[in-house]
Image: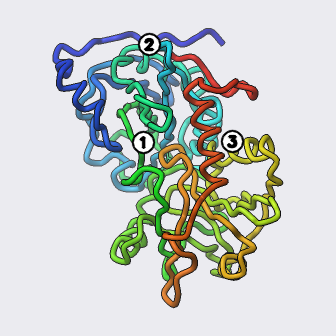
Amino acid sequence: MSTPVFSVRPTTTPVAANVRNEILGNPGFGQYFTDHMTHVRWTQASDWHAAEVRPYGALTVDPASPVLHYAQEIFEGLKAYRHADGSVWGFRPERNAARFRQSARRLALPELSDELFIESIRSLVQQDHVWVPTPQDDSEECSLYIRPFMIANGRFLGVKPAAEVDYYVIASPAASYFKGAGKPVSIWLSSHYNRAAPGGTGAAKCGGNYAASLVAQQEASEQGCEQVAFLDAAENKWVEELGGMNLFFVYRDGRLVTPALTGTILEGVTRDSVLTLARDIGLAPEERAISIDEWREGINSGEITEVFACGTAAVITTIGALVTENDTIGDPEQANGEVAQQLRKALLDLQYGRAEDKHGWLMKLA
Ligand code: COI
């Protein structure tokens, strides 16, 4: 397939350089957006067409569009990193492209080719490259967070797959996802809610999964926790994932365990990268079922020495404690997160071009 071409309609009102620089100095997460967005339209009759980079701004969505009523929507999350020579690189964007196609299939949305997905990102990053933050030192994890998403548009209230679809990419300069970058976080174990069930949409990255996690996330905040952990829906016994991140357990004997992909867990790109990087540093990764009892007993006996969460937004974050209705497993004051820190450094060094890209994971964007 030939490389898709995006026409560019530049904004006439870009954010002033001094304002942008102030934002880039302290971007937070998901609060500020770049000057442009990309858009590609799909109709049954014309397939994907009208690819363009245009000024960032409000969308035109019909009040009767399926996305508003039936949540026919999918999204992705990936980052662009500025290297010391000023160039900008993506990290395994082809994995996000593949997952986006899988999510599209599950939500009965049209698939976007990997070429179109990658070019939609490249076109936006090239147009808005001045928005990619430059890290001041090796510990800083600032980047451009890129959010591709696809919505069912049109005017029709019947429950059936949409005949009109829009795909967009927006981008947001980002620092660390959790406040107090690198500090261990506390997690709330949801006992009333599940995130996903067999046959459901757990393995797809669709808005509905995140909407369903919010009430549990609210409980977590009320308990003073940063995130919520979910168990499986069938037995309420097996650890699945957090509201938007995968989980890893470090064992004293060098095993690194993460819940296996059963169809109810999101196949994280960071998760997959951690499995490979773990092997590189001599750990023995295992993808298998892990029960909440194993978590509790492992921490109490010292068999499990660390627990961490990982994701594009969160990178790798140590979990200090799991708070449940009956007890608290672990102690944030005691959590050292040595292995998590080692993996985090290995991942960030690679993403920022400070370490050799042995696995061929980087893609130059600008
Ligand atoms: C990501 O890590 O990209 C996520 O999707 C998590 C969350 C910000 C939705």
- Give me the residue at 23% from left, 34% from top: 58
Residue 165 appears in view: no
Residues at marks 2 and 3, CA–CA distance in whole angstroms? 30 Å
Residues at marks 2 and 1, CA–CA distance in whole angstroms? 21 Å
* Of pointers 2 and 1, the one earlier in the residue sequence: 2
Task: Read off the residue under disc 2.
Answer: 6
Q: Position of residue 15 (x, y in %)?
A: 19, 22
Marks 2 and 1: which is nearer the front? 2
Residue 195 appears in view: yes
* Of pointers 3 and 1, the one earlier in the residue sequence: 1
Residue 286 occupies quadrant: bottom right
- Give me the residue at 65% from left, 35% from top: 95
Q: Nearer the viewer, residue 300 or 4?
A: 300
Task: Read off the residue under disc 1.
Answer: 152
Q: What is the quadrant of the N terminus in the image?
A: top right
- Judge the density around disc 2: few (<14), some (14-19), many (≥20) Cα neighbours within 10 Å: many
Residues at marks 3 and 1, CA–CA distance in whole angstroms? 31 Å
Task: Read off the residue under disc 3.
Answer: 273
